[in-house]
Amino acid sequence: MSTILIVEQVLNGLQFGVMLFLMAAGLTLIFGVMGLINLAHGSLYMVGAFVAATVAAATGSFLLALVAAMGAAAMAGALIEMTVIRRLYHTDHLDQVLATFALILIFSEGTRWIFGSFPLYLSRPEALAGSVTLPFGIEYPLYRLALIGAGLAVAVGLWLLIAKTRIGIQIRAGENDREMIAALGVDIRTLYTFVFALGAALAGLAGALVGAIQSVQVGMGEPVLILAFVVIVIGGIGSIKGAFVGALIVGLTDTLGGIFLPELFKLAMEPAAATQVGASLSSMAIYLLMAAVLIWRPTGLFGARTA
Amino acid sequence: MTRESFVNLALLTALVAVPLWAWVAGEPFTITLATRAVIFALAAVGLNLALGLGGMVSFGHAVFFGLGGYSMGILAHHAQNFLPLYDGLIVIEGTKSMPVIWLVAIVVSALAALLIGLLSLRTSGVYFIMITLAFGQMFYYFAISWRAYGGEDGLSIWVRNDFPGLNTLAPIQFYGLCFALLLAALWLSARIARSSFGLVLNAARQVPGRVETVGLDGQRAKLVAFVISGAITGLAGALFADLNRFVSPTMFSWHMSGELIVFIILGGAARLFGPVAGAVLFVAMEHVLGDLWDHWHILLGALLLVIVLFARGGLIGLLAGKARNHD
């Protein structure tokens, strides 16, 4: 196994990880501030990808497509927050699960109704089309490198927003004591809508960015959503830092496990059997990891409070 | 007789009368639909033990449904191809006998429920929901990658399995079997709810702290309920596979887990017959609306939203009014 392959796979894992972070950050923020479990987060990811593909096809501009994807996802998020989600903050988790599951049904089937069942294609921008040569002569696609950069930039931006700005203070205060912050004159309803729309915009951005390396189709958000759940369970629900660390762990485990586990088993088994066992095990690896984390720390790596 | 027991009786009567009418009238497809509804109802009755009585919102019950399905698929696959399941010191053959398959399905699902329950019950609330969901995905991906049993394509079984003394190929006889199992599961649920074990479980859901204070082990009661719940759903999975003569990883998918919860809520949470009413309503909608409009899931979603936001009692709640012991 060459160094080049290892470095490439680590980069792939990082790229996957930062995209998962964009999803997980919104989920964990919404849970931390509003106490809501949102299954429809994957639908917002899908909305972002479809809008990006449509806008890119119409205008030819990838940047415009990204902006439109974020805008549309944020608007869809704000809309469902004001019509449905708002009524769920004071209900139990079962109601939240059901109502957001209902939203998935409506979003997925609605998208299939409008766009049909065939996948759309979103091509990556011209400027990021080629590959670059990294140190040690490693060729790596520029677009994937840009994804890592974009994900890290969003992570920093989110940290600045929450740690340094006035709205960030309000969000953190909302996590701790919603009555008190409402009593201090902060419009908590608008704040909640903003947080939800922010999470939605991040999901939409992730959908658009990933849409350029995968096909854009109905149901594309669901596997990502479930991985994002694994991420925030590992990281600790409500913690952005946990979401970041968890996303990188899951991204790397999933990518590296698929490559190295079959190789590892080949040391002890016949190649065909090793490939089979390795593939099965690597598809389960992140869930086994999650189970291990939970045995060790039932509230996740950075989760302080019980859910 | 309360209005609720009247509604329950009407539901049971319909589940006997409609298939019988279809049998006399020569409408085998209606019987198949009714069988589908009854099997879904059985799976949801299983889930309701965990969700309704124990307050454990399991978003991974498709695991047990799928394990039941694959128990049937693997045993029948080996039997129909005359390949022994295990060929070592002792030889284990596959089988086409339903009672044996059911037993295997129940034992396998119960063991899986024990393992998943032991891990998941360390947590509660949202964590529990997400962990059960993640375990479901784990089994789903495992089934996809397990090529020996069809991988993504699943396994086809050529002929429905046998039950001593019955011709299971006749739709009405297979329906009768499934219906009898549903009645047995309902009876068991009602017994559990009234037993001292059920009372502990009920209390552990509502006031876990006090249960411990009086020296009862609420967590253990929850685990036992989770295991029984998984076993019943597993049995339903074996029947479902037999109905379709096909198993595939979609039985493990999280949509399946979601739909099982939807059955309970459509029918009415915290009601013995809620899962039955919900499954019947779902299959009826799937058939009627699905024929009218390809995108009927939009309507299902809208209905579900209305029930969650405005009509908490579901179908039985609408028909029978508020539950007597509402909590």
Image (cartoon, coloured by chain):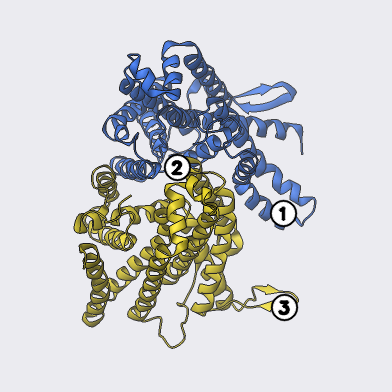
Q: Position of residue A232 (x, y in %)?
A: 53, 34
Q: Does residue A8 lie above or below B223 as drawn?
A: above
For chain A, the rendered hue is blue
**Structural crowding at the residue carrying mark 1, measured as other residues with C-alpha within 10 Å and reported as few (<14), some (14–19) or many (≥20):** some
Q: Position of residue A118 (x, y in %)?
A: 37, 44
Looking at the image, the residue that sits furthest to the front is B214
Labels 3 and 1 in the same subunit: no
Badge 2 is on which residue? A222
Badge 1 is on which residue? A274
The residue tagged with tag 2: helix, strand or loop? helix
> Visible in this render: residue A68?
no
Q: Does residue A132 lie above or below B260 as drawn?
A: above
Q: Position of residue B285 (x, y in %)?
A: 25, 58
Mark 1 or mark 2: whose residue is earlier in sequence: 2
Q: Nearer the viewer, residue B256 or A307?
A: A307
**From the viewer's perspective, is A158 left or right of A54?**
right
Give the CA distance from mark 3 to mark 2.
44 Å
At horizontal 54% and vertical 44% (from top left) the residue drawn is B123
* Residue A67, quarter of the rendered image: top left
The residue tagged with tag 3: helix, strand or loop? loop
At horizontal 53% and vertical 22% (from top left) the residue drawn is A128
Q: Choose mark 3 or mark 2, whichever is in front.
A: 3
Give the CA distance from mark 3 to mark 1.
26 Å
For chain B, the rendered hue is yellow
Query: What amino acid does circle 2 point to?
Result: Glu
Badge 3 is on which residue? B90
At horizontal 36% and vertical 81% (from top left) the residue drawn is B173
Q: Nearer the viewer, residue A183 or B129?
A: A183
Q: Are marks 1 and 2 in contact (CB under 8 Å)?
A: no
